[in-house]
Amino acid sequence: MKCPKCGYDNKDGAEHCDLCKEILVKPPEYGRPRTDLYQSRQEMSAPPRPSRPVSSSAGNVNIDNMEAIKFGWEAMKEHLWLFIGIGAAAAGIYGIEWFIQLIVTGGAKGHSFGSVFISLAFGYLNAVIFTLGYNKVCIKMADGEETEFSDLFSCFHLGGRFILSSLIMGLMFVPIVVVMGISAVILKKALILGIFGMIAAIVAISIIIMRFIFISYLVVDKEMDAMDCVKGSWNMTKGAVWDLSIFFSLQCLVIIAGALCLGVGLIAAIPTTSIATAYYYRQLSKRI
């Protein structure tokens, strides 16, 4: 060990220079070793995680749409193989459903009791896995947490709440469907009035979808009761309909771009938009 003061070559591990008595090994500050100066081998070898865009306070959330999509893109690249595995699982489950339906119905047309039962059972399975479980995966990525394939299958206890909250939301579409039906009848007699009625109904449907888009996220993240999830999604999206419209329009462009790449681009486009939506949810959830 060479002395930094006089240059004398001391033995390894020496605490003082044999020539000038300079201290070679300084004691740690406050008697405790500093561990913040070093990184573990795992930290140094691990790829950098996508940084989360900075948002404002909960009362006045201001989200940069492009930053959210960029975050989704970076997180997707880090977890691409996980999403490929999720896609393979989805294809496998749909394939199993088709095979069972083929055995039950024998390839005959029509809907028997067994066929309807299988459709409902697999519909519930897909809702729990590829809506709730998938949303949980995306939320954990938005939070910067470690994500595993098994997260897909961790939300079976929340299926009832999700179905009930979805039914409550569906009831809100009933008067709009009635308006659309009336507008269709008026359309034959009063063209302009019927067109305005149709446009108003479409706008109302779009607003309701955006106000309640985060119900499934609240079920997974907060494990709230069905009615509380409906109220929570309504409250957290208050005043954000226009921003959400722009955000989902950008997402549509991402999906279209992926589809134009011979469909292969959807492997990246769909997870990107899913993670971006989870990030958007996380920011808006600060309001409740």
Image (cartoon, rainbow, N blue to C red):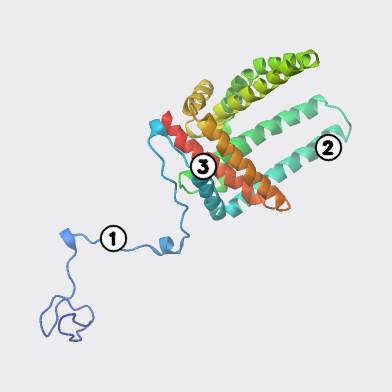
Residue at image x 41%, y 65%? 41
In the current view of this chain or complex, which residue is farthest to the right?
Answer: 108
Q: Amino acid at mark 2?
A: Leu
In the rendered image, residue 124, in percent from the top left (x then y), is placed at 66, 31
Amino acid type at image mark 1: Thr
What's the residue type where badge 3 is placed? Asn
Within the image, what quadrant is residue 90 found in? top right
- Residue holding disc 2: 102
- Please give the residue where the numbered disc 1 appears in the rendered image: 35
* Label 2 or label 1, whichever comes before in sequence order: 1
Between circles 1 and 3, the one closer to the viewer is 3
Label 1 or label 3, whichever comes before in sequence order: 1
Residue lying furthest front: 192
Mark 2 surroundings: few (<14), some (14-19) or many (≥20) residues within 10 A: few
**The one of 199 and 102 positioned closer to us in this rendering:** 199
Residue 94 seen from this side = yes
Write the residue at 63% across / 48% down.
Answer: 269
Q: Is residue 7 left or right of residue 51?
A: left
What residue appears at the point 14 percent right and 75 percent down from the top-left corner?
23
Is 136 drawn above or below residue 33 in the view shown? above
Q: Is residue 137 visible?
A: no
Q: CA distance from mark 2 to mark 1?
A: 62 Å
Which class describes the residues within 10 Å of circle 1: few (<14), some (14-19), or many (20+)? Answer: few
Q: CA distance from mark 1 to mark 3?
A: 38 Å
Seen at 88% across and 35% down, the residue is 107
Under circle 1, the secondary element is: loop
The tag earlier along the polypeptide, 3 or 2, is: 3
Residue 80 percent across, percent down from the top left: 59, 53
**Residue 12, image quadrant:** bottom left
Mark 2 or mark 1, which is nearer to you?
A: 1
Pointer 3: what residue? 65
Q: CA distance from mark 3 to mark 2?
A: 45 Å
